[in-house]
Image (tube, rainbow, N blue to C red):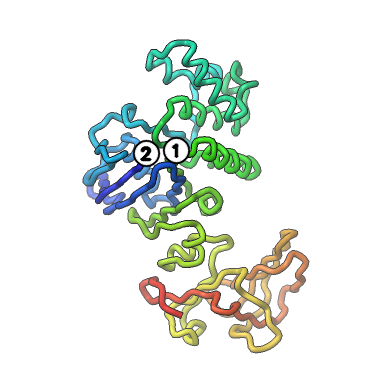
Amino acid sequence: MSDLKISKLHKRFGTVDVLKDINLDIRSGEFVVFVGPSGCGKSTLLRCISGLEAATEGTIEIDGAVIDDVEPAQRGIAMVFQNYALYPHMDVFGNMAFSLRMQRLAKDEIRRKVEAAAEKLQLTPYLDRLPAQLSGGQRQRVAIGRAIVRDPKVFLFDEPLSNLDAALRVRMRMEIAQLKMQLPNTTMIYVTHDQVEAMTMAERIVVLKDGRVEQVGTPMELYERPQSQFVAGFIGSPRMNFFTGKLAQAFKAHTVGVRAEHLDIVSADGIWAGKVVYAENLGADTFIYVDIGAEAPMVLRQPGKAVHDAGAEVRLAPKSNEFHLFDADGKPLPK
């Protein structure tokens, strides 16, 4: 078992509060993603869990045992970093075996663990290669393999895909998801600023803002029932459309939010009217940008072959009940 409990955790650097009253319960075997904009505290929280940073206040428990004063190497936690952190003079086998050799395990046991991890990660053909002879994705798999051999209770991933190109990120997301299925009893915590990674990988997402937990829930809970305007705007791609002032008065709200796929172009009775300013045809989808006099053009998702010329007059309406209302503090209002 590897239940993780964080209670009333604060972290300060000098007079700056980086983490503020963090309370989380992460179940054994769960895949949880910490997501938020740069500077929100997600990597600092991960480092506090690992022991690389000491919390200013609060406690961290694994399986009911407080680990605040336990050395990082003794916490049963393995961390995978953004920059791989591989030893350039060691081959793949040596990098994956290093921590086991430090534990003075028998050579046969080390080989068994390394070969089993290499098989999971499709690294068997590369065990005698140096990191410089590997692609970025292969290096990241070696870093993950080095963590797997330790049989950790908790895996921590700190933006592990940010150095990879777009196509490789998609492939590695799938590989990490498959790895989780092979290790069903291992708790995994994954940090990213990319909400697409969060939506596609997480069982639950923890959204952080300014050092606080803004909302915790499944990807679809956050997408369909955001508890703040910040979460509504952060989760989902393209970003939710927001408008205020006279455009929102008909809804009796300070701010109205509506997602691109929940907007329709209608021939009459549209709530908003405007001009097409730009269209992006991406094949399966076309994104239409319409100036209705709001702070930014509204974007709506249309089938890929939709044609709307710049300058065309259109009327827009949200699909039935598919919109969100917020007060002046960004809190949700009933529809």
Q: Where does residue 328 sit, x and y in percent of width and height?
A: 38, 76
What amino acid is found at the position of numbered circle 2 in the picture?
Ser
Q: Kindly give the residue lying farthest to the bottom in the view shown.
A: 269
Chain-order first, disc 2 or disc 1: 2
Q: CA distance from mark 2 to mark 1?
A: 8 Å
Q: Secondary structure under badge 2?
A: loop
Q: Which mark is residue 261?
A: none
Please give the name of the residue rendered at 72% of the width and 79% of the height, measured from the top-left corner. 312
Would you place residue 12 above or below residue 93 in this image?
Answer: below
Crowding at mark 1 (Cα within 10 Å: few <14, some 14-19, many 20+): some
Amino acid type assigned to the residue bearing label 1 in the image: Asn
Eyeballing the image, is 76 above or below 195? above
Left or right: 245 in relation to 237:
left
In the picture of the structure, the residue carrying the numbered disc 2 is 2
Is disc 2 surrounded by few (<14), some (14 to 19) or many (20+) residues within 10 Å? many
Query: Which residue is labeled 1 in the image?
Result: 185
Q: How many marks?
A: 2
Instruction: Tell me which residue sits at (43%, 28%) in the image.
Output: 151
Q: Is residue 185 left or right of residue 240?
A: left
Q: Residue at x 21, y 46 (%)?
A: 57
Does residue 19 appear in the picture of this structure? yes
Residues at marks 2 and 1 touching, judged by CB atoms closer than 8 Å: yes
Where is residue 220? Give x, y as percent: 51, 60
Q: Residue at x 34, y 43 (%)?
A: 4
Q: State the quadrant of the N terminus.
A: top left
